[in-house]
Amino acid sequence: MRGLIRTNFAILATSLAVIGVIAIWPIAEPTHIGMLAGDAYRGAYLARSSGCIACHTNSAAAGAALAGGAPLDTPFGSFVPPNITPDLAGGIGYWTLDQFAVALRQGVRPDGKAYYPAFPYEFYADMSDQDVADLWAALQTVPPIAEPAAAHDVSFPFNMRWGLKIWRAALMTPAAISPVLGQSVAWNRGQQLVTGAAHCAACHTGRNIVGGLKASEMLAGNDKLPGGSVAPPILAVALVAKGWTVANMAYALRTGVMPDGDVLGGSMAEVVQYSTSYMDDADREAIATFLLTIDGQVPKDVARETPIADAGMTGMAHSSGMVME
């Protein structure tokens, strides 16, 4: 009996020691871009393209811009997008640009704790220093809101943030985007948006039992979105089979109207309303070009016959501004 007690005690002590080591394990890589000047106008476009407005504004409750989003109900609990206005108490006004860069691209809070992957920081990992500085500059122009967003409501054991360090080590796959030779500027721009800032895979890819993206099902659809929504497959073959073309997809991303005359619903309606409708024509066409490419080519019957001007690889220059209703 004593032997069993000693064994159990040893297991407990070892477990606590392991948890202690994990809890103090630093996961953020130092970032030093604090002297980089940002372009708020370009940053406002980035905020739209990256989904910041849609996620961090609770439009259903007539919430203030970027003062905290609607809860995301998942199998792990309810996650509430935080207040990211420049208020010192309720928002992120006390942060530095370097801390913002680490949060955005690495998913680590200023206190060193990890963010839950409900925040799609994996997709922002490839943003340049200038992108981050521009987005930061744009956030400084938003009216500060003193009231913080509600806390997450996450059940045990998922409320133990130290466990996210294990999740990150096993499942995190930061976006790494490189231009592809032989593809058009529009295609490469579309890759940059779909794979990175617009984080299409966050919704249109299935997840495993611990919330990691299933690499084998990339963009193949997801029928278990927060709130019970469904995201259809957006693989090129499936899109072409349903009558999508570069022109009508670019139009749908601007207006929400699909080729059959129906309208996009669910979370995609919010994406159009708060994000893609504010993109310039070149970026919407770039997304369509990338998504409709099969074996390196856009089929002639779905390609736009008279393409609009290609978007620049770092472009987002034609901003509509961070205008929020």
Image (cartoon, rainbow, N blue to C red):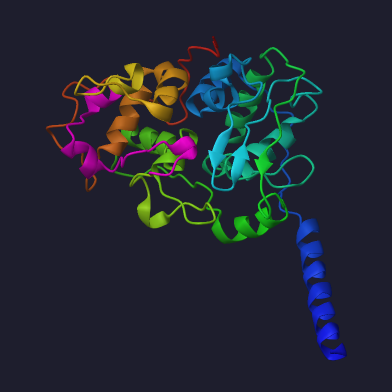
Task: Please give the name of the residue rendered at 20% of the width and 29% of the height, measured from the top-left corner.
Answer: 245
Residue 173 is covered by the magenta coloring:
no
Q: Position of residue 68 (x, y in %)?
A: 64, 25
Q: Position of residue 71 (x, y in %)?
A: 59, 31
Q: Relative to residue 61, is residue 100 depicted above or below?
A: below
Task: Please give the name of the residue rendered at 42% of the width and 37% of the height, measured from the top-left corner.
Answer: 200
Task: Please give the name of the residue rendered at 55% of the width and 22% of the height, measured from the top-left corner.
Answer: 53
Q: Quadrant of residue 163?
A: bottom right
Q: Relative to residue 183, is residue 12 depicted above or below?
A: below
In the rendered structure, the answer to whether residue 55 lies left or right of residue 264 reads right
Task: Please give the name of the residue rendered at 77% of the width and 30% of the height, measured from the top-left corner.
Answer: 95
The region drawn magenta spans: 223-250
Q: Position of residue 237 (x, y in %)?
A: 21, 44
Residue 242 is covered by the magenta coloring:
yes
Q: Quadrant of residue 145?
A: top right
- Looking at the rendered image, the quarter that the N terminus falls into is bottom right
